[in-house]
Amino acid sequence: MSNHPSPALRTGANDAGSPGRPANLATIIARIEEAVDAETAGLRSDRDFDLASSNARKSRHLYELTRAMKGVGEAEALAEHRDGLTRLRDKLARNEATIRAHLSAVNEVATLMRDVIRKAEADGTYSASEFGYGT
């Protein structure tokens, strides 16, 4: 008996996709859409949203999509999955806008905190910026 996995296990042939692909593209696209929707909603409504975990999940789905696309012609994939890919593109655009807004808010809070710390450290006589330190 060999120590190598059977071809069915190596290729993911027992998944929804054809042999050689881990799952069909429609299923993968749906998973990515679900992850993107969850991240967008989480960033908008949950201040304790775990962005790192969400990003890891999206990365895994992207890897799965990349594997599934091997051996599939781009034109073939576009023709067969045009609606799903268009929907995904739109969801990704909304997700990007939400992430940009989140990062902007984080930057604003960090700037406010930096300014408060600088003011608290200054005793009114001298400041680091007067001696060319800091910005």
Image (cartoon, rainbow, N blue to C red):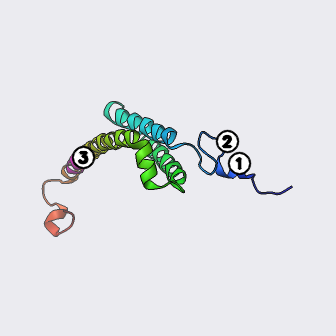
- Using the image, determine if residue 124 lies above or below residue 96: below
Determine whether, in the image, residue 109 is placed left or right of residue 48.
left
In the image, what residue occupies the spot 86% across and 55% down? 1
Closest to the observer, 25 or 32: 25
Residue 110: within the magenta? yes
Within 10 angstroms of label 2, few (less than 14), some, or many (20 or more) residues?
Answer: some
Q: For residue 14, which quarter of the picture?
A: top right
Q: Which percent across, then down, holds residue 135?
A: 18, 62
Mark 3: which amino acid? Ser
State the residue position of label 2.
14
Residue 47 seen in render: no
Three-letter amino acid code at the position of disc 1: Ala
Name the residue that disc number 3 marks.
Answer: 104
Q: Secondary structure at mark 3?
A: helix
Quote the CA–CA distance across marks 2 and 3.
Answer: 44 Å
Q: What whole-number distance in Å separates the C-alpha atoms at marks 2 and 1?
A: 7 Å
Q: Reading the chain from its start, which is encountered first: label 2 or label 1? A: 1
The residue beneath circle 1 is: 8
The answer to whether marks 2 and 1 mark residues whose Cβ atoms lie closer than 8 Å is yes
Residue 71 visible from this viewpoint: yes
Q: Toward the viewer: 107 or 125?
A: 107
Residue in front for this viewpoint, 135 or 48: 48
Seen in the picture, residue 109 relative to 129 is either above or below; the reply is above
Write the residue at 30% across / 44% down: 93
Asked whether disc 2 touches disc 3, contact meaning CB atoms under 8 Å apart, the reply is no
Q: Which residues are magenta?
A: 109-116
The mark that comes first in sequence, 1 or 3, is 1
Q: Residue at x 53, y 49 (%)?
A: 64
Mark 1, secondary structure of its residue:
helix
Q: What's the residue type where badge 2 is placed?
A: Asn
Report the residue that reaches farthest toward the bottom. 132
Of residues 122 and 66, the one drawn nearer to the viewer in this rendering: 66
